[in-house]
Amino acid sequence: MDLVTEQADDEIVFPPERWVATFRSHAQLILHELGEYLGYSPPPLLERLIEDAQKIHQQRPILQETLATATQLRCES
């Protein structure tokens, strides 16, 4: 935001809520440009999707386990 306000005319106002929405809508482009500038290359998209889809969050119970536990508790009651 500092960079943008430095380049803008002094009388222009940047409401914080509008700035957040504007930045969010341009975040992908900003990150892409920054990555190219710094020489980073993202991992291939397909490989990343396959890898991430196989991960199970360790702290999140699997839906079937949750359902089985809830059903068991209900039957015991």
Image (cartoon, grey):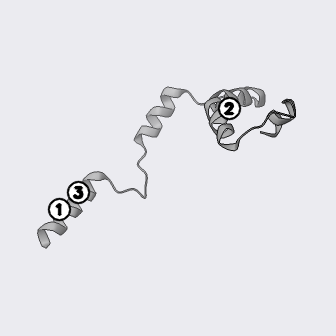
* Earlier sequence position, callout 3 versus callout 2: 2
Label 3 near label 1: C-beta < 8 Å?
yes
Distance from disc 1 to disc 3, alpha carbons, whole Å, reads 6 Å
Per the rendering, the mark at residue 31 is 2
- Hey, which quadrant is residue 30 in on the image? top right
According to the picture, the residue beneath numbered tag 1 turns out to be 71
Neighbourhood count class around disc 2 (C-alpha, 10 Å): few under 14, some 14–19, many 20 upward: few
Which quadrant of the figure contains the N terminus?
A: top right
Whether residue 72 is situated above or below residue 40 in the rendered picture: below
- Hey, which quadrant is residue 28 in on the image? top right
**SS for dot 2:** helix
Look at label 1 and name its amino acid.
Thr
Look at label 3 and name its amino acid.
Leu
The residue furthest front is 11
Neighbourhood count class around disc 3 (C-alpha, 10 Å): few under 14, some 14–19, many 20 upward: few
Distance from disc 1 to disc 2, alpha carbons, whole Å, reads 46 Å
Give x and y (percent) for residue 64. 25, 53
Position of residue 42 in the picture relative to residue 63 (left or right): right
Position of residue 55 in the picture relative to residue 29 (left or right): left
Distance from disc 3 to disc 2, alpha carbons, whole Å, reads 40 Å
Whether residue 56 is situated above or below residue 37 in the rendered picture: below
Which quadrant of the figure contains the C terminus?
A: bottom left
Residue at 65 percent across and 42 percent down: it is: 17
Residue at 61 percent across and 31 percent down: it is: 25
Position of residue 13 in the picture relative to residue 29 (left or right): right
Give x and y (percent) for residue 76. 13, 72
According to the picture, the residue beneath numbered tag 3 turns out to be 67
